[in-house]
Image: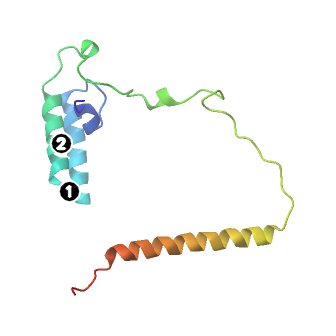
Amino acid sequence: MERNPYVILGVPFGSPKSVANAAFARKAQALKRDGGSLDQMTDLTWALQRVSVAIREPATAMELYRIPADPEAFQADGDGVLRPPPERLPPVDGDRASALEGLRQGAAREYLRYLVSVRATRVTLPPP
């Protein structure tokens, strides 16, 4: 599947060159600031070049896939099959203090496991 230059630049399909230039500048600055790779900059440059070669009739162009430019297209306007309302669970009687302590201990173990795994990636073994 071919890459879509509009998706790489983050602009709606059929956007004019001025919009593409602004998006390129914004993304290139972000790459420089965040230490992006040369491959990412090459992709941005390729996408800008492709968008600069304007599509004559964007409404009839079928060679590029499109995603909706309107983020609200994915928002449901109410409850339904794909967006059911939350189900409330009935309250459970029991010792809340010991349950909370169990959650704290579990979270502490998970955080310790995370710290150990991060530290393990930084440790280098001495040569034999």
Please state, as top left, top right, bottom left or bottom right, where the N terminus lies in the image. top left
**Horizontal and vertical percent position of residue 34:** 26, 59
Q: Residues within 10 Å of mark 1 (few under 14, many from 20)?
A: few
**Horizontal and vertical percent position of residue 81:** 64, 27
Mark nearer the viewer, 1 or 2: 2
105 over 13 or under it: above or below: below
Residue at the outermost right position: 93
Q: Mark 1 and 2 residues: CB-CB less than 8 Å, in contact?
A: no
Residue at 58%, 73% (x, y): give it. 109
Residue at 50%, 72% (x, y): give it. 113
Q: Residues within 10 Å of mark 2 (few under 14, many from 20)?
A: some
Q: Which residue is mark 2?
A: 43
Please state if 56 lies on the left or on the right of 108 as rendered.
Answer: left
Say which of 73 and 66 sits in front.
Answer: 66
- Please identify the quarter of the rendering in which residue 32 is found: bottom left
Amino acid tagged 1: Lys
- Please identify the quarter of the rendering in which residue 99 is found: bottom right
**Horizontal and vertical percent position of residue 127:** 21, 85
Q: How is the image coloured?
A: rainbow
Q: Compute the Cα span from label 1 to label 2.
A: 14 Å
What number is the disc on residue 32? 1
If you read the primary sequence from the N terminus, does the residue marked by circle 1 or circle 2 appear first? 1
Please state if 20 lies on the left or on the right of 95 as rendered.
Answer: left
Residue at 26%, 12% (x, y): give it. 60
Please state, as top left, top right, bottom left or bottom right, where the C terminus lies in the image. bottom left
Residue at 32%, 76% (x, y): give it. 122
